[in-house]
Image (tube, helix red, strand yellow):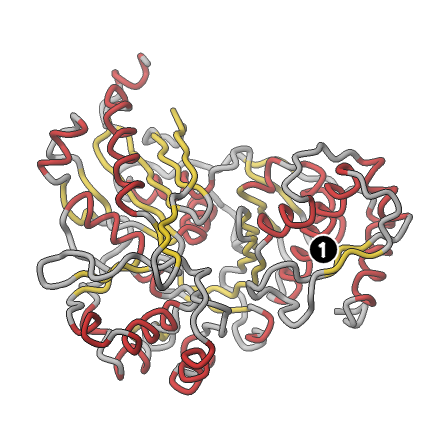
């Protein structure tokens, strides 16, 4: 604890609200993660739709901030996924619970929304299932309960909702709005025709940079946690764009690398890449970075798919089992979840598994993640250096399988917390030198065997082998 107390500048608390888990981390100005606290993201069963239990999560956050008081926290930055928002009335009270993006929207409303949403050419946002397009959520709520929706004065992106709960500041931020919401036009750097025509654009607060100080801690929260009232609360950022910020801040070569950000979602990103060949019907998009620049992306729900394939088992995979599964031509074919991805019209299927053991299922899950990752990277034409961050960075065999087929050198982050490090780097922007990411070289594994296996898998998917 000595290095914590002696630091001239205070430390940053990063509050990362994911779909499956929420995490609070304390990070030094130099990029050292001192402590992580984590909890399952609490849900709330609403009569109309599944929602997030924001009050329960807020109570957990305050408890953790109080427990971490010795770490000299002087700033907090929220991070969240981009498929949720909070609707506040004139008195800044929630009009309705924050919707879980996996809640099903009625088919009739989905059909009506299809007629209203802007074209992909305007938003670079593909049509996604359920409530994964934030515009679809707003459209549904405005039609199912017009009286309640008329009370909405403020629409807050999810990361900025937590900024407001901590500080009282009402702000918006571009990387959250530019993430498959249907609400943002990257070409004009402004709200989409849908957001303007529906009257939603004027209900979003003013745009601020993710790194800016939105305000300071509410006095009641300062008293409850023991933190100083002057504790800064930053505007906040979209999660995968936070990881991208960490990558770009710590990369010192001329051409930026591609990135594979992994967790519940696996997201392939190619900064400065081409946007003209994105396949909207295969979950490609132009996500907007913290500076408003569109970044070609392709994604699939990799963490959740692995759990589905393995039944939630936590077996260790070794090279021998991977080789056995490939030699026996056992296949896990997409898609196991109704969550978009490169093969949205296929139904997940396992073929040819001779010995259905937990170890074999785990090997199939790793192979599936590697195959879908390579598919996503190829769709955004990312033939350059690749950095793997997040959950997959802690799985050497998965990283090595990806390296076996990726057209360029592959490295992975030494820490699995690039989202956390990127958020803290943003919180200290212009104050301290940006820390370099610690990276490890990844060497290919079973390259010939995996290439042949991928060709077999592509044929089973009905996709040309050259794709």
State whether residue 340 is above or below residue 371: below
In the image, 360: left or right of 129?
right
Residue depicted at x 64% and y 50%: 308
- Residue extending furthest toward the top: 2
Q: Quadrant of the N terminus?
A: top left
Q: Quadrant of the C terminus?
A: bottom right
Pointer 1 local density, CA inside 10 Å: few below 14, some 14–19, many at least 20: many
- Mark 1: secondary structure: helix
In the image, 88: left or right of 355?
left
Q: Which residue is mark 1?
A: 371
State whether residue 371 is above or below residue 307: below
Residue depicted at x 47% and y 46%: 247
Q: Position of residue 347 (x, y in %)?
A: 69, 66
- Residue extending furthest toward the bottom: 115
Looking at the image, how many numbered discs can be counted on the residues? 1
In the image, 26: left or right of 150?
right
Residue depicted at x 38% and y 76%: 187
State whether residue 220 is above or below residue 163: above
- Residue extending furthest toward the front: 47
Q: Position of residue 277 (x, y in %)?
A: 58, 76
Q: Position of residue 269 (x, y in %)?
A: 53, 58
Q: Work out whether residue 131 or residue 389 is closer to the camera in this orientation and state it.
A: 131
Q: Position of residue 30 (x, y in %)?
A: 36, 30
Q: Work out whether residue 348 or residue 267 is closer to the camera in this orientation and state it.
A: 348
């Amino acid at each position: 604890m000595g290095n914590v107390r002696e630091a001239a500048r205070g430390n940053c608390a990063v509050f990362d609200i994911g779909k499956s888990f929420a995490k609070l981390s304390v990070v030094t100005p130099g990029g050292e993660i001192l402590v992580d606290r984590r909890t399952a993201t609490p849900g709330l069963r609403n009569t109309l739709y599944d929602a997030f239990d924001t009050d329960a999560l807020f109570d957990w956050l305050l408890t953790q901030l109080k427990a971490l008081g010795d770490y000299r926290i002087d700033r907090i930055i929220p991070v969240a996924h981009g498929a949720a928002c909070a609707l506040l009335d004139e008195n800044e009270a929630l009009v309705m619970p924050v919707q879980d993006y996996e809640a099903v929207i009625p088919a009739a409303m989905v059909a009506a929304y299809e007629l209203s949403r802007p074209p992909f050419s305007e938003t670079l946002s593909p049509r996604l299932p359920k409530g994964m397009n934030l515009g679809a959520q707003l459209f549904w709520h405005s039609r199912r309960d017009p009286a309640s929706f008329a009370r909405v004065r403020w629409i807050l992106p999810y990361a900025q909702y937590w900024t407001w709960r901590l500080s009282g500041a009402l702000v918006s931020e571009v990387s959250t709005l530019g993430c498959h919401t249907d609400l943002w036009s990257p070409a004009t750097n402004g709200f989409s025709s849908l957001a303007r025509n529906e009257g939603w654009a004027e209900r979003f607060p003013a745009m601020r940079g993710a790194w800016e100080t939105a305000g300071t801690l509410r006095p009641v929260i300062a008293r409850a946690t023991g933190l100083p009232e002057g504790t800064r609360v930053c505007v906040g950022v979209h999660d995968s764009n936070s990881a991208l910020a960490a990558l770009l801040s710590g990369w010192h070569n001329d051409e930026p690398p591609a990135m594979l950000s992994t967790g519940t979602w696996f997201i392939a990103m190619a900064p400065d890449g081409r946007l003209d060949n994105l396949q909207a019907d295969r979950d490609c998009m132009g996500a907007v970075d913290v500076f408003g620049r569109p970044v070609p992306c392709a994604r699939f729900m990799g963490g959740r798919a692995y759990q589905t394939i393995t039944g939630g088992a936590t077996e260790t995979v070794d090279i021998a089992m991977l080789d056995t599964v490939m030699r026996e031509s056992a296949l896990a074919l997409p898609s196991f979840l109704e969550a978009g991805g490169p093969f949205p019209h296929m139904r997940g299927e396992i073929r040819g598994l001779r010995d259905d053991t937990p170890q074999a299922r785990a090997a199939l899950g790793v192979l599936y993640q590697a195959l879908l990752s390579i598919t996503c990277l190829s769709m955004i034409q990312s033939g350059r250096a690749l950095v793997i961050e997040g959950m997959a960075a802690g799985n050497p065999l998965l990283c090595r399988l990806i390296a076996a087929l990726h057209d360029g050198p592959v490295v992975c982050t030494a820490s699995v917390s690039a989202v956390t490090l990127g958020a803290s780097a943003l919180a200290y922007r212009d104050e301290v030198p940006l820390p370099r990411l610690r990276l490890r070289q990844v060497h290919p594994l079973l390259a010939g065997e995996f290439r042949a296996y991928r060709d077999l898998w592509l044929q089973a998917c009905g996709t040309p082998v050259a794709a």
